[in-house]
Amino acid sequence: MKHTPLGTQDVNQLVAGLNRVARNLWWTWNQEAQEVFKELSPRSWQNLYHNAVAILHEVSDYELRVRLQHQPFAERVREVIARFESYLNEKNTWAAANAPALAENPVAYFSAEFGFHETLPIAAGGLGVLAADHAKSASDLGLPFVGISLFYREGYFQQAFNHDNWQTEYYTLLNPKNLPMEPVLNAAGEPIKCYVRLTASQVAFTAWRVNAGRNPVYLLDTNLPENEPHYRDLTLRVYGGDSTTRILQEILLGVGGVRLLRTLGCKPSTFHMNEGHAAFLTFELMREKIAEGRTLADACAATKRECIFTTHTPVEAGHDRFTPDLMRYAAGKFAEQLKISFDELMAFGRVDPKEADEPFCMTVLALKSSRAANGVSELHGQVSREMWQVMYPGKKVGEVPIGHVTNGIHLLGWMKGTIRQFWKRKLGEARVEAEDSGDTTRFWRHKNDWEADVNSPEFWARMADPNFITDEELWALRYRLRRELIEFARRRLLIQGERLTRGDFIAFDHLLNPDALTIGFARRFATYKRAPLIFQQFEHIVKLCHDKARPVQFVFAGKAHPRDEDGKRFIQHIIHLSKFTDLKGHLVFIENYDVHIARQMVSGCDVWLNNPRRPLEASGTSGMKAGCHGCLNLSILDGWWREGYDGTNGFAIGDDSHPDSIEEQDRRDSANLYKALTEEVIPTFYNRDASGLPRQWLAKIRRAMVTLVPQFNTWRMVQEYATKYYLTK
Ligand SMILES: *Cc1c(COP(=O)(O)O)cnc(C)c1O
């Protein structure tokens, strides 16, 4: 068949459209867009780590135009662009119906990190991933939203290991030209410039705009020639440097963020502090009011009405505390601006204002200057009320004004391509059948509109129906996802250079077994998460791995904070086990954990292991990513799992309680973990019927999809923030 060639005009439109799509993170949660970029050069797509902007630089304009002469490809590109435009222009959103009050006055969401995608590695862990998922769902819901963070040009560290298997860190420079971000320009078309006072200097900063669907996220950047070198490097790394760097980064984030919004003419109705890092924004809001001639009391009260605060951890080290000396040096100017004494300034961050030795705590400042505060799961809300009761003398624990909104994940952003294709095909078939039978009301206008329903209980309720998706299909899907993970792990281990000693050589084709029960553990190696807990029963675990009839294997990943020696020791121990013990070939450690590795692991593992020291895992979100892929949780009843687990949809380690003594808790949890593994997990997985299917296991997967997925997502979470907090003053 011969096609008439596309005219130059048409080609120009497609090229321009593709460039617009690449510069909006929307493509990271749209499969067809990703496939178009991938198809331009599958090898570059892998080498450039799935970077749409970089792909468009890699493929020459000439080649792109020739490729667009291929009609079916041009058609797909046109469709992606059309869907992108219709997404941006959709008026009929949740927020249009439910939050019209925010139309002119968006929510300003301040977060020290955002973990959007593997190509923009400016997050250290779960906090940043949550912030990014919040932003993505705010966009999907049509919620007016603006994000504020910093542009760390060296991002978070890359993980490597020395010959002792000790974690070392290195950094790579991010190139804004190859990232989905653009400089924020002023009316004259030049990069915008704002100033913030840091110690005794005026420091200039500029900003980058990241398009997160319909909404902007601004990243502040002090890397300007007019700044002294140490201020240029303030935005070098995520949580880089010492506590001086930390406090100055936080002043830039809080004060600088408000200044940028003012410069852009943005008038937020609510300032949402995602963790205490951003709490200096309250001083800037007070300063503005005092400069207008209002009294301190008035300025405080008015600021409080504008702010809400989410606390994310009961772990002590997660709450920034600055000494009075550091505060005087870095933040003393605030006292002058607010026309108060230094002691009065310190009082904002002290539980006991009269305690002169008490450091300045960002969480205390945030709690004192917010109209509402919340933890990130029911149990964490409770723990936070106990933890901060001291700030509210006379109030009983239950009366402490900290509520909770349980975290979620952005479902479409986390669903792996394989599972999306699966749903698209299944629902496509159902749609055709319905149309054939004359029923056109139940299905979508467009074949991809199923995505619009993906957060609803009705969508996932289908999983309860073995006629809609048979056990055979579901098991085949699980096999495919597991194999994809194993292939990914083998490739990564080859790159990691895990050459095993001669004579002992394991070919990479034999590393891990595609039929074996695969248990995953990937998270930050904070010690309270107890990564090596399962190996306390080392001899038993070796036996389980070597069981020919019912083998078990483990995939681990995770980074320790650069200064966390104990966390690094945990990683070293696990790598040692994977290389030099009888676990070799049955346990692997994948380096450089990030959102891409997370997606491979939560989709390919059969079991997602989570064994924190309760109640320190405020929520946890990686287990939520497992649910939609049919990976079952095996977890302590902490954080979200205490709400999610119902006895049928996964596995619990221990019960809804914990002893006070840490030693006792570790001993008990280790025993309970082994018990759950050998008495429930392994028998259920390997209990096969005549046709080789693990019927009870598959029933659990169905239950997990029906009960967990529509609940633990950011579509529900952002609506909850909106109705509980953003819309109530
Ligand atoms: C989801 C995610 C996290 C958070 O997982 P937790 O269960 O809260 O530990 C951390 N890092 C990455 C890269 C993630 O994708």
Image: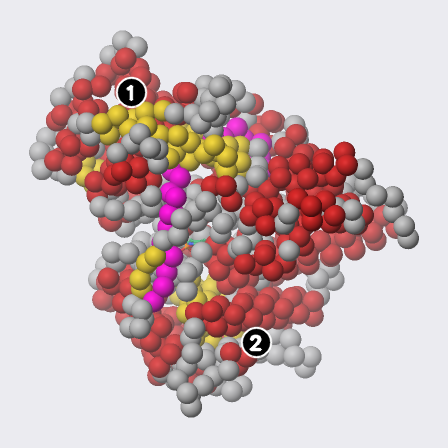
- How far from the left and from the top, in percent, is residue 337? 22, 19
Which residue type does callout 2 highlight? Pro
Decide if residue 210 is in sight here.
yes
Between 379 and 414, the one lying in front of the other is: 414
- How far from the left and from the top, in percent, is residue 335? 18, 22
Reading the image, the residue beneath label 1 is: 286
Q: Is residue 646 left or right of residue 401?
A: right
Hey, which quadrant is residue 308 in on the image? top left
Structural distance between the alpha carbons of marks 2 and 1: 59 Å
Which residue type does callout 1 highlight? Met
Query: From which residue to which does the magenta span run?
Result: 138-161
Sequence order check: which comes first, mark 2 or mark 1?
1
Considering the numbered disc 2 on the image, is that residue within a helix, a strand or a loop? loop
- How far from the left and from the top, in percent, is residue 221? 37, 35
Colouring style: secondary structure
Instruction: Name the residue located 26 percent from the left edge and 25 percent from the top edge.
Output: 202
Which residue sits furthest top? Answer: 293
Reading the image, the residue beneath label 2 is: 514
The quadrant of the picture showing ligand 1 is bottom left
> Is residue 154 part of the magenta span, yes or no?
yes
Instruction: Name the residue located 30 percent from the left edge and 40 percent from the top edge.
Output: 233
Between 456 and 560, the one lying in front of the other is: 560
Decide if residue 613 is in sight here.
no
> Is residue 127 part of the magenta span, yes or no?
no
Q: Is residue 104 left or right of residue 336?
A: right
